Amino acid sequence: MPLINDYNLQQHKLGGGTYGYSATKITDLGATEYTLVTIAQDVSASVQDFKQLMEKALKEIVNACRLSPRADNLLLRVVLFSSSVKEGHGFKLLSEINANDYDNFLKTGGMTALFDAAENAITVSNDYAKQLVANDFSTNGIIFIITDGENNSSTNTTKTIKDAIDKVKKSEALESLATILVGVGTQQTPELSKKLDQFKNESNLDQYIDIEKADAKSLAKLAAFVSKSISAQSQALGTKYKFVSVSDTLTF
Amino acid sequence: MMNSDSAFFIGKSHKICQDYSLYKDSLGLSYAMVSDGCSASKDVDFGCRLLSKCAEKNISLMLNDWDSLRFELTSVKDAFLLSDSLNIEQSSLDATLLVAAVKDDKVYLRASGDGAFILRKVNGDFLVINIVYPRGYPCYPSYLLNKDGFDKLLLHFTERFCDDYKYRVNIELYDFSLKDSTLILNETREANAAIDYKWSLSYKDIFDSKQYDLVLVMSDGIHTFFHKNNIISFEYVLSNLLGFKNYRGEFVQRRFQGFLRVCGQEGWDHDDDISFAGIHLGE
């Protein structure tokens, strides 16, 4: 694993004490508002076949976001999940991310703690947003949960994920939170698209993106979609609206 | 390391924001200024911007020729040339100009028109300088643009308005402490700044920068916060506004954004436009 998380991030513990996260020190932030971007990436054993393409997609997302007029207002966190959830790196300013650090970033193996990853991404975003708002910043958030399989190793349930989303709404720290589930290479597994869409609905996530093939062309399209969505969500800051695509479910 | 920032926000009663603010940090010099266009004049949204940008261009005049009105006169003349070239009426320049600058261990404060300066002392107490025109007719640098010349203008005002209460300016100085989000008044006193030309310069003074760590300047819109038709006192507004969390980057915009969030929760609103700028002098 590259030293991608060695930047001077501050460690945070969550109330329950089950896991923590890292994020840029609030005193190091200079803008008025930030979009908290989380990419929760499946690194279970089955991702091995396309892990290099996925790393390339991560680099493309970061490089594309750098060109966004909102580049200085983005904080990116990457969460990796297999049998358990690990933080690839905490919320970092784009200017502090070296895209080449994503080479050999994904270490695959194990099962798919999809629900835990989703809950982690939502809860951590809300917690950091609360701290930012307490320090006069405005925030919104966008979460991408990218998986090639259904959940088979989580302590959380669709209900706890739904509850986490409800907490986000009640706390009002995040002006809005867009949650997007992405199924990759779904044609390999019968019924996977249907099950992920069902997971999206039961957890109250906003959108499901179905990518049938985990090939270079499809993952390049995914990278473009993710970076455009990040930019759109960030531009929505201050409006109370959030980014949504034309349909709850997209296939490409 | 000094850091400056500014912000301006439209008031509830306005269709176009007629306030403007700007700031700059360069080697050894930081400045922050606000300008509030007269809502009775046309195109003052352009005017307050032109005046501010021209004042920025002429900031060295303010520092080097402190006792004269060359800064205001040159700035408004430059602004007039620009507005005239755009076929915008001269009255568009009817706008206040409040400037705070820090250079060589000195804090320079200079105002034409109403508004407020706030200095935070290194012990955390605040000095508030509130410039008020009780009858609501503040002076503007544009009054220096009279075609008959500045001397005639002075005579004109001396004869007609000098004793007129309409143009009287009150300079109110308060010393406050901020404890647990409550402002505690320590002292009220008279301004000791010498004002030679009431009708074009409202206030000027120089302070020792070593005694202060934060300098703020704001337009008179800060006095227009209300809740259910009741005006909220200036002191109460300040007690909620002055709780800065940190001073990195856009610290003024952030603080005002946080303050407006509280206003939203409390049901407060502000009628007039507000411009707000500040210089943090460092730790």
Image: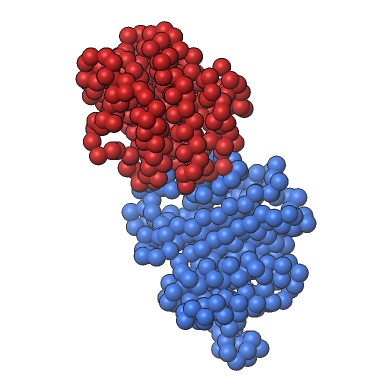
**As drawn, is B248 to the left or to the right of A216?**
right
* Residue in the image at 49% along x and 78% along y: B86
**Picture quadrant where residue A215 is located:** top left
| Residue B144, placed above or below residue B184 | below
Q: What percent of the width, then of the height, locates residue B118? A: 61, 55
- The mark tally for this picture is 0
| Residue A196, placed above or below residue B71 | above
- Image coloring type: by chain
* Residue in the image at 73% along x and 54% along y: B27
Q: Nearer the viewer, residue A153 or A246?
A: A246
| Residue A177, placed above or below residue B153 | above
| Residue A40, placed above or below residue A98 | above
Q: What percent of the width, then of the height, locates residue A3? A: 60, 21
Can residue B36 be seen at all in this image of the molecule? yes
Q: What percent of the width, then of the height, locates residue A22? A: 53, 24
Q: Nearer the viewer, residue B117 or B164?
A: B117
**As drawn, is A250 to the left or to the right of A57?**
left
**Picture quadrant where residue B59 is located:** bottom right
Can residue B183 be seen at all in this image of the molecule? no
* Residue in the image at 33% along x and 40% along y: A242
Q: Nearer the viewer, residue B164 or B56?
A: B56
Chain A pictured colour: red
**As drawn, is B69 to the left or to the right of B262?**
right
Chain B pictured colour: blue
**As drawn, is B253 to the left or to the right of B12?**
right
**Picture quadrant where residue A25 is located:** top right
The quadrant of the rendering that contains the C terminus of chain B is top right
* Residue in the image at 39% along x and 40% along y: A228
Q: What percent of the width, then of the height, locates residue B119? A: 64, 53
